[in-house]
Amino acid sequence: MAGEALFLGWGQVVRAREQLALEVFQEAVTYYGKLQEEGQIERFDAYLLEPHGGDLAGFFLLHGEQAKLDAIRSSAEFQRLLVRAGSVIDNLGLVGAFGGDALGHQMALFGEMAQELPQAK
């Protein structure tokens, strides 16, 4: 199914770890680029957010097939990178995401479930 992704979000850099945070960010970009070259992911996108008073400062979206994303997520190399990132940034979070056909599938499941629930009057 097309449209599955991993959302990896982060908050502010831990004070006095700015240089290390840049190194870990570059390590992540290199690693995700390697995954793309090897066909493990279709692509990845990186975003930094403007200051907005919230906890989210930026995120990666890794796009690919669900089975491959699951394998990456449980790999030792990915877990090592998460631990390194967690040591230099606050509010690290990882969650599956759905877009494209995968979003349509998730919404269809929601619609089926909604039909089974009593509706408020």
Image: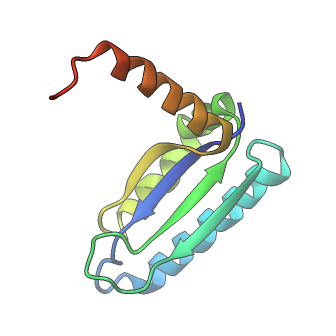
Above or below: residue 4 compared with residue 28: above
Above or below: residue 76 compared with residue 17: above
Taking 31 as reference, is 52 left or right?
left
Q: Residue at x 67, y 48 (%)?
A: 63
Taking 53 as reference, is 100 left or right?
right
Q: Residue at x 33, y 77 (%)?
A: 12
Q: Specify the quadrant that holds the N terminus.
A: top right
Image location of residue 110, percent across then percent down: 42, 27
Image location of residue 57, percent across then percent down: 39, 75
Taking 108 as reference, is 38 left or right?
right
Image location of residue 54, percent across then percent down: 27, 74
Image location of residue 35, percent across then percent down: 74, 50
Q: Specify the quadrant that holds the C terminus.
A: top left
Count of all numbered marks drawn on residues in the image: 0
Q: Residue at x 63, y 52 (%)?
A: 62
Farthest-out residue, front: 121
Q: Between residues 37 and 51, which one lies in front from this camera angle?
A: 51
Q: Between residues 121 and 101, which one lies in front from this camera angle?
A: 121
Above or below: residue 67 compared with residue 101: above
Q: Residue at x 36, y 17 (%)?
A: 115
